[in-house]
């Protein structure tokens, strides 16, 4: 089948409006990914594969936000090469979403999720080839494959969002408003999820010509970049899987209610007065130790007295683990 009936002559956007929109979108994407990569790196824990995958996802997505600086003939092949890294980042995002959502899924659900992610990879091979052919003025196959990107990229992400919202309501004693009030980080997470899905919908409407306008050349628009940034933000704002993060919040809630017996056993009720007495004793001990801490000469600290800043600043660490590390236990 012949896809080329004319010389395509695909070039860098020359229309001022289109050039400004594309340059702004790329700058927004790269700047956001760099900041998120720095935040993820400073809060990741050693030996946690999920944290490393998130960092790789952010790194691979940056390259495709720099082709606006190049000019033909470099522009065409540079755009196509960086698109490979972007497509890998998109698929990696679905793997990360699978890992984060996996504790909520049954065994067959986990297998089905990751199997379907693997099965759509041939499409991305075709999309990469179509991208090269299109921007080398060889074939317009890319104009036929581009509208299907969202179908092969986003269903798993939308399922993950719905699964998280469903499990918050059914497995935990949190309403959405209460959860966002107790944990502003979850408020940002849910907001980013909603925005990402909103921009996915707008991107689909743009590439299918339902909406059109100046500054939206074929295959290039700002909407998928906005959707991608907000999807990456959901990976960065909470590095661990969703169940771990929610369990910590639930444990915090139960502790405040005096309904937890230990760090490892949730849901066993204990005497509220006993728990209150223990907290009072702990507070008294801390207050007695305070004068010695204030009077200590902090200009002469031993190694054991240095605060563990990595533990103090790490967003996804367990607060009780951090206290133990500060006490040397």
Image (cartoon, rainbow, N blue to C red):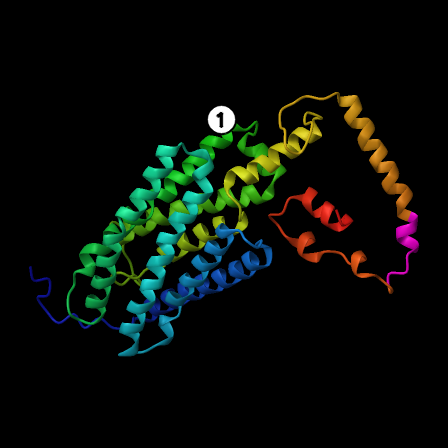
Choose between 189 and 85: the one closer to the eye: 85
The residue shown at (20%, 66%) is 134
Does the segment drawn in magenta span residue 292?
yes
Return the residue at label 1.
170
Query: Quadrant of residue 225 in the image?
Result: bottom left
Q: Is residue 63 left or right of residue 243?
A: left
The residue shown at (49%, 42%) is 190
Residue 161 seen from this side? yes
Q: Is residue 308 above or below residue 270?
A: below
Q: Is residue 291 left or right of residue 11?
A: right
Q: Is residue 246 above or below residue 257?
A: below
Residue 166 in the image, given as x and y percentages of width and height: 45, 31
Q: Is residue 79 left or right of residue 293?
A: left
- Magenta stretch: give its range: 291-298
The residue shown at (10%, 62%) is 3
Q: Is residue 266 above or below residue 14?
A: above
Choose between 236 and 10: the one closer to the eye: 236
Residue 177 in the image, given as x and y percentages of width and height: 56, 33
Q: Quadrant of the N terminus?
A: bottom left
Residue 129 in the image, given as x and y percentages of width and height: 21, 63
Residue 208 seen from this side? no
Residue that sits furthest to the left in the current view = 1
């Amino acid at each position: 089948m012949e896809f080329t009936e004319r010389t395509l002559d695909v070039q860098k956007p020359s229309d001022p409006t289109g050039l400004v929109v594309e340059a702004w979108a790329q700058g927004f994407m790269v700047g956001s990914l760099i900041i998120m990569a720095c935040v993820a790196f400073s809060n990741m824990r050693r030996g946690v594969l999920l944290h490393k995958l998130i960092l790789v996802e952010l790194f691979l997505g940056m390259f495709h936000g720099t082709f606006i600086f190049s000019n033909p003939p470099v522009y065409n092949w540079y755009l196509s090469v960086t698109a490979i890294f972007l497509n890998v980042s998109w698929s990696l995002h679905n793997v990360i979403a699978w890992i984060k959502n996996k504790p909520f899924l049954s065994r067959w659900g986990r297998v089905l999720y990751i199997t379907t992610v693997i099965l759509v990879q041939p499409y991305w091979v075709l999309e990469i080839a179509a991208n090269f052919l299109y921007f080398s003025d060889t074939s317009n196959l890319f104009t036929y494959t581009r509208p299907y990107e969202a179908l092969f990229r986003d269903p798993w992400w939308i399922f993950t969002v719905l699964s998280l919202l469903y499990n918050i309501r059914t497995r935990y004693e949190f309403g959405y408003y209460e959860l966002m009030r107790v944990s502003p980080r979850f408020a940002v997470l849910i907001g980013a999820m909603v925005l990402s899905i909103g921009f996915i919908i707008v991107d689909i409407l743009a590439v299918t010509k339902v909406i059109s306008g100046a500054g939206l050349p074929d295959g290039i628009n700002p909407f998928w970049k906005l959707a991608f940034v907000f999807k990456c933000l959901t990976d960065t704002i909470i590095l661990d899987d969703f169940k771990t993060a929610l369990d910590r919040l639930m444990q915090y809630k139960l502790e405040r209610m005096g309904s937890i017996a230990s760090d490892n056993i949730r849901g066993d009720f204990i005497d509220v007065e006993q728990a209150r007495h223990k907290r009072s004793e702990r507070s008294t001990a801390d207050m007695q130790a305070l004068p010695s801490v204030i009077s200590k000469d902090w200009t002469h600290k031993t190694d054991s007295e240095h605060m563990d800043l990595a533990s103090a600043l790490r967003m996804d660490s367990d607060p009780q683990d951090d206290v133990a590390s500060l006490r040397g236990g």
